[in-house]
Amino acid sequence: MENAIMVAAALIGAGLTMGLAAIGAGIGDGLVTSKFIEGLTRQPEAKSALFTNTLISVGLIESMAIIATVVALIRCIKISYAMELIYAKFNLSKDLL
């Protein structure tokens, strides 16, 4: 029973982490894109420099969301693996898993 609670908490935490990372990335992408459009309307001749900076910024913002998702999934896997080791060390039944 304790394992089920721990795994459920890990999955809820992973879901929150991924959801908040996606929300943050969406907000960040929207802000960067809005500033790009604003800069483009003020100074159309700087389109190439603004576009390059925008693509780099959006790529970095999205990479942070992807890294957060990977870290959340790795933590879930490690928690379930650690619980299996604990059950094996103390010779507990696998029915509790």
Image: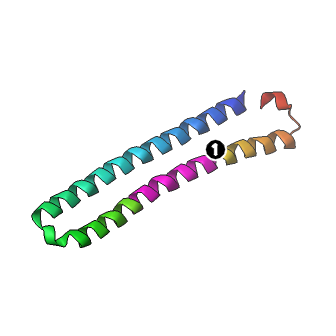
Q: Quadrant of the C terminus?
A: top right
Could you say where residue 50 lies in the image, as x and y percent from the top left?
Answer: 24, 68
Residue extent of the magenta highlight: 60-76
- Camera-nearest residue between 42 and 86: 42
Question: Label 1's element?
Answer: helix
Q: Nearer the viewer, residue 42 or 84?
A: 42
Residue at 12% across, 68% down:
43
Horizontal side, residue 89 vs residue 36: left or right: right
Q: Position of residue 4 (x, y in %)?
A: 69, 30
Near-viewer residue (19 or 40): 40
Residue 78 in picture, x, y percent from top left: 69, 48
Tell me the residue at 32%/53% (across/down): 28
Local crowd at mark 1 within 10 Å, few (<14), some, or many (≥20)?
A: many
In the rendered image of this protein, does residue 9 appear above or below residue 53? above
For residue 66: magenta? Answer: yes
Residue at 22% from the left image edge and 60% from the top image edge: 36
- Chosen colour scheme: rainbow
Q: Is residue 43 above or below residue 28?
A: below
- What percent of the width, then of the height, locates residue 31? 26, 53
Figure quadrant of residue 3: top right
Residue corresponding to mark 1: 76
Q: Quadrant of the N terminus?
A: top right
In the displayed structure image, the side of residue 60 where residue 91 appears, left or right: right
Q: Residue at x 68, y 44 (%)?
A: 79
Quadrant position of residue 40: bottom left
Q: Residue furthest left?
A: 42
Identify the amino acid type marked 1: Cys
The residue sitting at the right extreme is: 91
- Residue 48 in magenta stretch: no
The majority secondary structure of the magenta stretch comes to: helix
Q: How many marks?
A: 1
Apparent side of residue 27 relative to residue 17 in the rendered image (left or right): left
